[in-house]
Image (cartoon, rainbow, N blue to C red):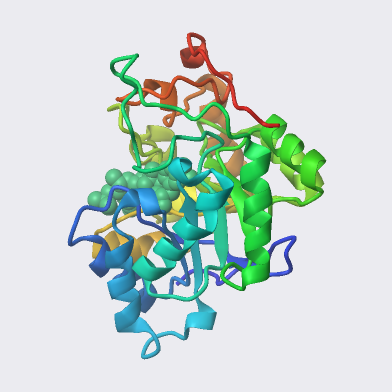
Amino acid sequence: MSLGKTVTLNSGKTIPQIGLGTWLSQPNEVEHAVEWAIEAGYRHIDCAIIYQNQHEVGAALKKVIPSVVKREDLFITSKLWNSSHQPDQVERELDETLAQLGTDYLDLYLVHWPVAFPPGALFLPDESKPGYLKLDTETPLVDTWRAMIKLLDTGKVRSIGVSNHSVEHIKGIIAATGVKPAVNQVEAHPLLPQDALVEYCKAEGIHLTAYSPLGNNLVGKTKLVDYPEVAEVAKRLGATTAQVLVAYGVYRGYSVIPKSVQKERIIANFQQIELSKEDYEKIAEIGHKAHTRFNIPLTYVPHWDVNLFGEEEEKGATHTVKIL
Ligand SMILES: NC(=O)c1ccc[n+]([C@@H]2O[C@H](COP(=O)([O-])OP(=O)(O)OC[C@H]3O[C@@H](n4cnc5c(N)ncnc54)[C@H](OP(=O)(O)O)[C@@H]3O)[C@@H](O)[C@H]2O)c1
């Protein structure tokens, strides 16, 4: 079992520190995964409409509520997709997510990316630029955030936040609205410690959730669970490499959402260990040698022509985020 730790958000709600990720779970996999996770004690499930599997998550929730867990004891996160950034689309898409999950409220609703696409389909190709997706370069992030803020009055979301947002993006939405996101969900692991973002969010009382904590990637690089430095610490502690990586994120104060569809891994990933300062530093050392960000939309196929993080790989992008 996990140590059952929770973190209190600036909204006053609490988020369980370890959750289950559901991205890239194939059809017929995620329903079991969510069921096994909740039976194993997970109370935090990370979803998104773009994962196109929320109906399966909903089917699992239907099986375990209320026999295994009460709805109010779960923490369910979902995310607004890029093609619903236009203010008149925001509540409509939330309603779609709620219907898919079979719940009448979310514990946390995030703006998935600080990038708007035109409404009407999850993705639309840019006919004038083969290989690229069509962007909506008119809708500013602040307008989307204002629509997110309005959701708090509907009772359909308990907390609102953002994902993949930089310090600059967050500063922009706070300056315009005075409302701080409760959470910023970002890629974070030893190869991407995000020190400046961590420091800023801590100072502002914005909680960080770490995604891809095991170093999952779509580009075929070695996963962090297979790094010798992680294996060495894991062996000495009698733990798995995934447990060490989850503990690294917890040590840094993140909530951590490892994804698995395998029952043994789901159970083991939730068996929490704690790192000593020395072991934490050994794992942190990995990132001093090699900075790696796995999720860069300009490198996705099809590409999103936008520079989000200021990474080397994003240098050729035409657009930056329209904040105001
Ligand atoms: N906000 C965003 O833009 C964003 C982006 C990416 C991810 N996320 C969220 O964060 C979650 C986690 O990130 P992620 O899915 O990218 O990557 P991850 O959790 O770091 O890694 C998942 C990969 O690790 C494998 N794995 C799981 N447990 C393992 C273990 N104990 N030993 C070895 N391998 C193990 C999984 O395979 P099996 O399933 O076969 O075990 C899968 O291939 C996502 O599912 C999603 O909910 C959010």
Residue in the image at 70% along x and 62% along y = 9
Q: Residue furthest top?
A: 316
Q: Position of residue 124 (x, y in %)?
A: 33, 32
Residue in the image at 52% along x and 80% along y = 73
Q: Position of residue 262 (x, y in %)?
A: 24, 59
From what the image shows, is residue 69 above or below residue 84?
below
Looking at the image, can residue 260 be seen? yes
Does residue 36 appear left or right of residue 188 in this picture?
left
Q: Position of residue 253 (x, y in %)?
A: 65, 52
Q: Position of residue 228 (x, y in %)?
A: 38, 34
Does residue 68 appear left or right of residue 139 in this picture?
left
Q: Residue furthest bottom?
A: 67
If the image is split into quadrants, where does the N terminus sit? Answer: bottom left
Viewer-proximal residue among 111 and 93: 93
From what the image shows, is residue 16 above or below residue 257?
below
If the image is split into quadrants, where does the C terminus sit? Answer: top right
Viewer-proximal residue among 122 and 244: 122
Determine which quarter of the picture holds residue 239: bottom left
Does residue 180 appear left or right of residue 59 in this picture?
right
Viewer-proximal residue among 251 and 172: 172
From what the image shows, is residue 243 above or below residue 290?
below
Residue in the image at 52% along x and 23% along y = 291
